[in-house]
Amino acid sequence: MKIIYGIFLFLYLIIMKVVIVAFLVSFVKLSVGQGIYAPAAGQTGTTAIHKDSSIIVSWASSCHVIRGLKHIDSAQLGYASQGVDSDALAIADGKTVSLGDSGVATIQFDGTIYDGAGADFVIYENAFDPTFLELAYVYVTSDGVAWDRFDYDYTDPRTTQIGPFGASDPTHIHNLAGKYEVFYGTPFDLSDLRFNPSIDKNAITQIRIVDAIGDKNRLHFLTDSVYVNDPFPTPYESGGFDLDAIAAIHLNPATSIDEEVANTIRLYPNPSINTLNIIGEFDEVIIINTQGLLVSKSQEQSIDVSGLSPGVYFANVKHDNEFIIKRFIKK
């Protein structure tokens, strides 16, 4: 009898969750009206991409997070601390790293993302239902120096604050990460970027995600942006945007260059203290830190790295308009 009772209880809890979620979705739609953008995962017209989609070709290989505060106006509460950087790597699994208020995550792939037909990459958050949406701005770079943010739109007309566990309607959200529930990613198409001569849409080396602070007082939002209202405050260890994973749809793999050529490129000594030597034929070396910032650019075989702070760096070795990405450590 206990087993049967347990089964009925489990089924009851599942049904109640479905009912509650359906109620929240209906309530939000009735109170703010349907928007013009794609609806939640599973609905007609959605753009959500499931983690097991066959169009995904690769997952992020590197992630560096700079945490934000649990509550932007209460520094004494400290910083978000849920998860670690590596939780954003590989396939979306619901295990996340929390950014906190205005926290930043910088992501790399084993290769460069290019502008193909339709979506080019997908960002996964861990929203536990279709309406609890924590949002983030998305930027890209092709050289680690110039960054461009995706133009986005947020049309929810409410002027009252969405509370810590409040509901949002994804039909009011466009080109913001976090639009869809766990295991369903938000797609981004590089053709949506404005023309920027500093950005090569066919050679994106890094993606940057910045948590959007959705406070109604509008004290903490990008001055050149549309105001975003999402759950606030979220003064928890898991506060802010929760990054689960990033998938590439259109990727030029780092190994696409002739392997014999790639194997001739070597860095020594590694770890380095004062000088990093590049062995092999190349056109240019661009050194980027784990925050996605360019720290050195050279065409020389020997590069002075004595001024770099100790840590991990990526040497993007350019050869015939392709990059071979090598990792090295500065001591």
Image (cartoon, grey):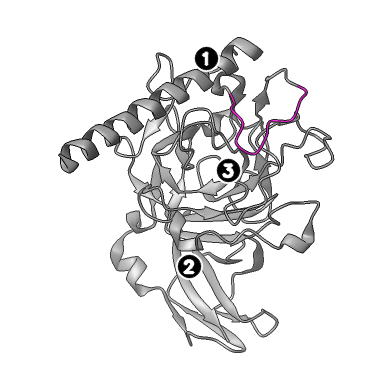
Q: Position of residue 10 (x, y in %)?
A: 28, 36
Q: Which residue is rendered at x = 37% and y = 54% of the image? A: 90
x and y percentages locating residue 253 in the rendered image: 37, 52
Pinpoint residue 120: horizontal percent, then vertical percent: 45, 36
Q: Quick one: 267 or 101, which is closer to the camera?
A: 101
Q: Helix or strand or loop: what does disc 1 sit on?
A: helix
Amino acid type indicated by mark 2: Phe
Q: CA distance from mark 2 to mark 3?
A: 20 Å
State yes or no: discs 2 and 3 in contact (Cβ < 8 Å): no
Observer-side mark, 1 or 2, equals 1
Q: In percent of the image, x 47 and y 85: which residue is there?
A: 268
Determine contact: label 1, label 2, CB under 8 Å: no
- Type of the residue with mark 3: Asp
- Please tell me whether mark 2 sits on a helix, a strand or a loop: loop
Q: Residues within 10 Å of mark 3 (few under 14, many from 20)?
A: some
Tell me the residue that label 2 is attached to.
282
For the record, the magenta segment spans 159-168
Q: Determine the main secondary structure of the stretch shown in magenta.
A: loop
- Name the residue type under label 1: Ser
Q: Earlier in the sequence, mark 1 or mark 3?
A: 1
| Mark drawn on residue 200 | 3
Outermost front residue: 1
Give the quadrant of the N terminus: top left
Q: What residue is disc 1 on?
A: 26
Where is 254 relative to 119, above or below? below
Q: Earlier in the sequence, mark 2 or mark 3?
A: 3
Contact, mark 1 vs mark 3 (Cβ under 8 Å)? no
Evaluate whether residue 188 shows in this view: yes
